[in-house]
Amino acid sequence: MASRKNLVADRTALAHKARYALTHPQRIPGHLRRAGRDRWLAFKHRDHVSYYRAIMASDTRRSPDAAVGSPNRAEWLRLGQLQFDYLRSHGLKPSVRMLDIGCGNLRAGWRFISYLEQGNYYGIDISPDVLIAAKRTLTERDLQAKLPHLTLTQDLTLDFLPDAHFDVVHAHSVFSHSPLDVIEECLAHVGRVLAPGGFFDFTFDRTVGTEHQVLREDFYYRTETLTGLAERHGLNARFMDDWELLGHGQSKIRVTAEPATSSDSVAASPSVQV
Ligand SMILES: C[S@@+](CC[C@H](N)C(=O)[O-])C[C@H]1O[C@@H](n2cnc3c(N)ncnc32)[C@H](O)[C@@H]1O
């Protein structure tokens, strides 16, 4: 499948904006509406988490599926399946204990909950609105007996979770909406909650050019910025090449707390790419 990534664009550059407007004129009114709303929300909410929570409240009111990035139910189902199939192909087993950071309305979460043993799924999110939508998904899928945890959080210190507990920590399309200090907070603390041999997978919007952000909603990072940050917190980080083959718009990094060995369950990948 062809990649949908544009790795070189600086979306804040005037030339890029002009080119984009000329080639996608139908998107201009929607973008202007979004920019106006975001400016107002940024004025009301100075810290990023409060700002993004307000965005999620506004987007979830319209459509929870669209709020997590899927324009329709078919896409919502497809994106959830993609995440589930990827982790299954990387050794996910029903006995695994999983922490899903930014679980949204359980686009992938319901599949993990259904597959994992009772109580082994722990979803956290900053948005009460999307967590209410998550409970609706749980009910629609008849997954009450699986007793998943769904918890509201204000930060990513993970301080309410036990040491060495989770085999898999997962954050899909969360750091693509996060400034570096939020990502760093997570990387500073995730090692404590990872079980021996566990890993933390996260996706990000990748650029090979200038790092930039759009409306404080979408953040574009170079791979080495994030792998370097993980390493500064004593973690090992590797770029997941096999994820690139799936045609998703974001890239994926895997972080572990121990030195990588050849017996890793992960398929070997070459050194970090840009
Ligand atoms: C694009 S959605 C993806 C949801 C889910 N991971 C999925 O793939 O369906 C991003 C989610 O991350 C949540 N989020 C954003 N920043 C967060 C943070 N710092 N901590 C926890 N959740 C966050 C948002 O509220 C939203 O539900």
Image (tube, rainbow, N blue to C red):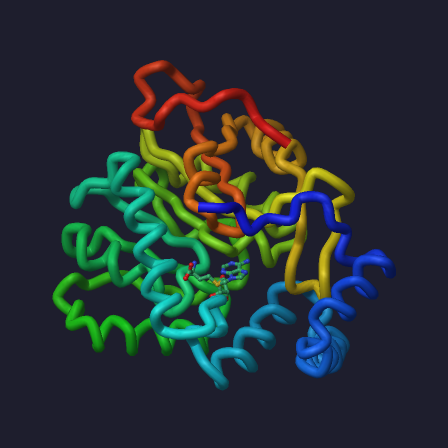
Residue at 49 percent of width and 73 percent of height: 67
Where is residue 93? Give x, y as percent: 19, 41
For residue 166, what is the image quadrant? top left
Where is residue 91? Give x, y as percent: 25, 35
Task: Using the image, determine if residue 111 lies above or below residue 255.
Answer: below
In this image, 82 relative to 68: left or right?
Answer: left
Where is residue 238? Give x, y as percent: 50, 29
Residue at the outermost right position: 14
Task: Using the image, determine if residue 71 lies above or below residue 81.
Answer: below
Nearest to the observer: residue 211 or residue 15:
15
In this image, 17 relative to 86: left or right?
Answer: right
Residue at 46 percent of width and 47 percent of height: 247
Residue at 45 percent of width and 52 percent of height: 172
Residue at 35 percent of width and 28 percent of height: 266
Nearest to the observer: residue 182 or residue 247:
247
Where is residue 192? Give x, y as percent: 43, 37
Question: The C terminus lies in which quarter of the figure?
Answer: top right
Q: What count of labels does the image hold? A: 0
Nearest to the observer: residue 125 or residue 19:
19
For residue 18, what is the image quadrant? bottom right
Task: Using the image, determine if residue 236 lies above or below residue 11.
Answer: above
